[in-house]
Amino acid sequence: MRFTGSEGFVGKAALAVGTALVLTACSGGGGGGSAGGSSAPGAAGSGVSAKPTATPTPTRAPYGPVLSAGVDPVTAALGQVAGAKDLSDLDTVLAGVVTSAQGAAKSLSVADEPPVATTAQKELVAALTSLATDAGKVRSDIKFHDVCALSSAEAELGASQGLAAVSAALVKMTAAGYQTTFAVPPLPQQQSRSLDNGTMVRKGKLRGEGVFKVENGGTADAVVSLALNGKTVHSVFVGKGQHASVDGVEDGTYEVYVSGGADWDSDAKGFTQNCRFTKFEDTFPFETGRTATSWEITLQPVADGNAKTNDVDQNAFPQP
């Protein structure tokens, strides 16, 4: 731009322009000394020196309710054992024990326990896992007739190492200040009952002339029954490794059934453990005046044996 007028005016105009340039430089520069170094109260940079707000420490959730939420369903499931009326009922109850114990072990394994309960919690998780395994085994033993009475199945559960370990872990938990309502229901102990060899479990008239001999070379006790038309007439207890006979068998053509196992329950007339039910394929005729008035069977497999047996469903097996 060109200015006209006196020399002094031009000089003033030039000063003004210079001043404006200086002002423009000060207002547009971010690194000027006066702006960056100001310490006056209320200056734009004064907030940088304020102290940060402290983050509150999270409050630990109460452990007692977490422990109870895991253990109480197990207690409830075990409490239903006493109400089982038969093995089918008990199998259903045991399924609940397995599910609840597995769920408790899973939830407690990730629970935020207080340091005082750490050892007890680890033991409890392991014990609950073991209990689930043990209850599952009882279910399997029911299915495969390794236990075949309510009493023996309940006794197997009562002998569970996992069940004992849960109780022991919860004792430690109580000592650490965390108590539960866990309780083990009354359960029977496993038994090993037997009869004297040769005892007649069922004794018919025995007024005939037939003789029926049994040799039990097996490893389990047995009750051998002579039946007519599917109904037991005579039954004899034959101990493992022993032999017995039934004298005075009346004329007739008999079917022979064999029940084998351990722990004979005289009231139920059956073995409560390791039950096996078989029937000889052949029938055994007894007829007075004929040579076939005496029969002898062996209960263990023999190389030159001429009699075969078949498994029989327990529900189709005639009671001795």
Image: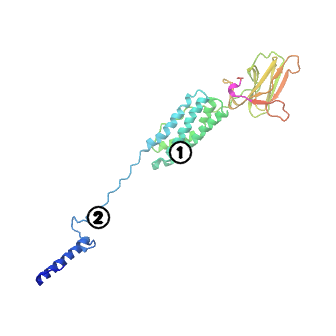
Q: Indicate the quadrant containing the N terminus: top left, top right, bottom left or bottom right.
A: bottom left
Query: Which element type, helix, strand or loop, lies under badge 2?
Result: helix
- In the image, 34 versus 249, the foreground residue is 34
**Residue positioned 46% across, 50% down in the render:** 115
Which of the labelled discs sits on residue 125, or is there none? 1
Considering only order in the chain, which callout, 2 or 1, is on the residue closer to the N terminus?
Answer: 2
**Residue positioned 17% across, 80% down in the render:** 2
Magenta segment: 311-317
Query: Circle 2 is placed at which residue position?
Result: 48
Residue 6 occupies quadrant? bottom left
- In the image, 29 versus 299, the foreground residue is 29
Mark 2 belongs to which amino acid?
Val
**Residue positioned 51% across, 36% down in the render:** 75
Q: Where in the figure is residue 183, as x and y percent of width and height?
A: 51, 35
Residue 5 occupies quadrant? bottom left
Residue 21 appears in view: yes
Q: Is residue 116 above or below residue 239?
A: below
- In the image, 142 versus 170, the foreground residue is 142
Residue 265 appears in view: no
Residue 225 occupies quadrant? top right
Mark 1 belongs to which amino acid?
Val
Between the C-alphas of marks 1 and 2, the distance is 52 Å
Q: Residues within 10 Å of mark 1 (few under 14, many from 20)?
A: many
Q: Indicate the quadrant containing the C terminus: top left, top right, bottom left or bottom right.
A: top right
Q: Where in the figure is residue 97, as x and y percent of width and height?
A: 55, 36
State the colouring used for the structure image: rainbow
Relative placement, left or right, of 113 versus 277 is left
Q: Where in the figure is residue 100, as x and y percent of width and height?
A: 53, 38
**Residue positioned 50% across, 37% down in the render:** 73
